[in-house]
Amino acid sequence: MNQDVDLPAPLLPRRLAALLYDILLVLPLIMACVILVMGLRTLLGFGAAEDGTVRLDANLVRLLALLTTMAFFSWFWLKNSQTLGMQAWRIKLVTFDGGKPGFRQIILRCLGAALSAACFGLGYWWVLIDRNRRYWHDYLSGTELVLLPKPRAKQKKNHNPAPDGA
């Protein structure tokens, strides 16, 4: 049994704050991927209009955004079960028994999150009525978010030097 089992689920404002942090990190990655694909298409002679501009199909951009976002979250979750936003807000992804999620669970979670969003966000809003505060993709993947306790304050060492006359 893992110690993360009995930790509470984070409330929605904390989840949204962590997500905002992560969005600020993933958006530049998405832009870099789109620029890279545009550059490759130009080098290979695809997609250049008569006026010299390079256009990408909107569906290709959506696919790039989805894959980049999935790669971002998957990499962090596989590495230490937390994205940078989750670390800042003390949120951790764990399995229902408190363990570290595996590759299959993380892929299921990412695909389920995309499905939750595609259903007008209903899978995300579910957290507001679920007694365990879980999303649809939590149930699909067997994972959940937990709120880590505040780190204990380190005790300061007494650095008071002895008086000169002592």
Image (cartoon, rainbow, N blue to C red):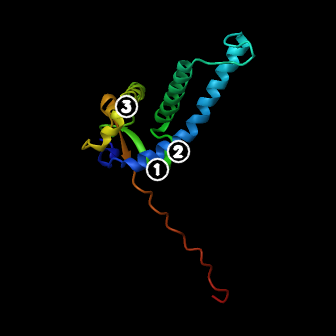
Q: Tell me the CA gap for discs 1 and 2.
A: 9 Å
Q: Disc 1 marks which amino acid?
A: Trp
Q: Position of residue 10 (x, y in %)?
A: 36, 48
The residue lying at 42 percent from left, 57 percent from top is 150
Q: Position of residue 90 (x, y in %)?
A: 44, 49
Which of discs 2 and 3 lies nearer the camera? The answer is: 3
Q: Position of residue 101 (x, y in %)?
A: 39, 33
Looking at the image, which is closer to me, 139 or 80? 139
Q: Which residue is mark 2?
A: 21
Q: Residues within 10 Å of mark 1 (few under 14, many from 20)?
A: many
Q: Which residue is mark 3?
A: 120
Regarding residue 87, the answer to whether it shows in the image is: yes
| Secondary-structure class at tag 1 | loop
| Secondary-structure class at tag 3 | loop
Question: What mark, if any, has residue 89 been given in the picture?
Answer: 1
Looking at the image, which is closer to me, 49 or 99? 49
Label located before the other in sequence (2 or 3) = 2
| Contact (Cβ within 8 Å) of mark 1 with mark 2 | yes
Label located before the other in sequence (3 or 1) = 1
The residue lying at 66 percent from left, 25 percent from top is 35
| Above or below: residue 81 compared with residue 34 | below
Q: Position of residue 64 (x, y in %)?
A: 55, 23
Give the left or right position of residue 3, taking residue 84 as reference.
Answer: left
Q: Disc 3 marks which amino acid?
A: Phe
